[in-house]
Image (cartoon, grey):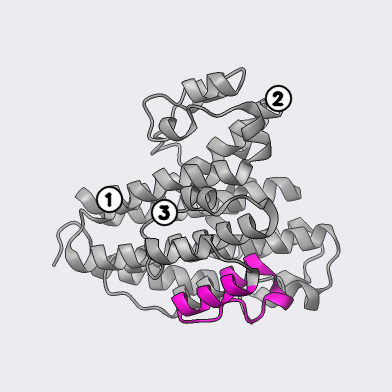
Amino acid sequence: MNPNMAYYAIQTKIISKKGHLIRELDWEKLLECKTVDQVKSLMLDNKELSKLMYEVKNEEINRDRMEVLLGRFKTVETEDLLHYFSGNYKEFIKSLLLVSELQDLSLILRRIAREETLEGIEERFVHSKKHETLPFDNLMSSKNVAQFTENLKGTPYYSGLKNLTKEDAINREFHIEMKLYVELYRNLMEYANKLDKDDKDAALELIGLKIDLLNVQWIYRALNYYKISPEEILIYSLVGGKSIDYKKLKKLCYSKSMEEFFELVKSYLKLDIFSNMDVLGFDLSINSYSYEYLRKKKFRNIGAAVSYIYLIGIIVDDFTTIVEGIKYNVPKEKLKEYLAYRM
């Protein structure tokens, strides 16, 4: 038995969490909500989500506040799981918190590049304050993009952004995000490789799946919207995928048409994740595929924790969609179509 992971305890904990979060949550009632406060009330009745809502239990909250709270949920749940790990295993789980740091890093950068105020920005942060790895105080004191990148010196993200211009930050937002992801996933794989073999294999499988889907999403957008060169698309792509190695990645980047791109993705992933794209849209097709994969896949190792953390991200997206639907008075049956969760 691995001394760095309380396996039976973590397995029991995750089964319990999934039960509260998915099976005991009344999605039909959620879809019937007409106000954000009604959503909050249902969340307060759920054992997992109530931890998130407790601080605003007696407040009337708006859509923006709810979306920030939802964004923090994955952070809160990841922090909760850390108690069951030690050594390299704890460091690996902590590394999964880096995604939320990148979200907040990108938020600061966007506001600075657009010369918007940073006042109150901390209220929108979703990263873990307990396990912070970036100098957020210094970043928030930056007056311009040049100062921002200078304040990133000493972090893994500096080399990728050191030549960043204001125009890049505004006009090439998704490109910048992919640059940051390159370093993030390099770190995740580095931590995963320090685990025992079975745990390492499970962690790399899940990280690799995430990389594959991020690359498919990036290349689709690059081919369909950005119209940039295949060489540049490849530069911004991530390595380390589960099913799409560098050679396959290069073929995707050099696709001569969207039809060729879709066929290649289908052959590499051994599944047509775009079969319902006309109905669901591109991003939701990917989320729906991920949700079903993570929900059905069983792990008897650290993969149980990683898959749960990734699953939360999709559930948070669905909750955010419901909150958005309330804003625009989207009918219940129509709103169902926009969820990765299938009822």
In the picture, the disc for residue 20 is none
- Badge 1: residue crowd in 10 Å (few <14, some 14–19, many ≥20): many
Mark 2 vs mark 3, foreground winner is 2
- Badge 3: residue crowd in 10 Å (few <14, some 14–19, many ≥20): many
Q: Which residue is mark 2?
A: 117
Q: Quadrant of residue 146?
A: top right
Q: Which label's residue is closer to the chain start, 2 or 3?
A: 3
Q: Quadrant of residue 298?
A: bottom left
By secondary structure, the bulk of the magenta-drawn segment is best described as helix
Q: Is residue 173 left or right of residue 323?
A: left
Mark pair 2, 3: CA separation: 31 Å
**Residue at image coords 32%, 63%:** 204
In the picture, the disc for residue 78 is 3
Is 20 rendered above or below residue 231?
below
Q: Which label's residue is closer to the chain start, 1 or 3?
A: 3
**Residue at image coords 64%, 69%:** 258
In the picture, the disc for residue 191 is 1
Extreme-right residue of the structure: 329
**Observer able to see residue 254:** yes
Residues at marks 1 and 3 touching, judged by CB atoms closer than 8 Å: no
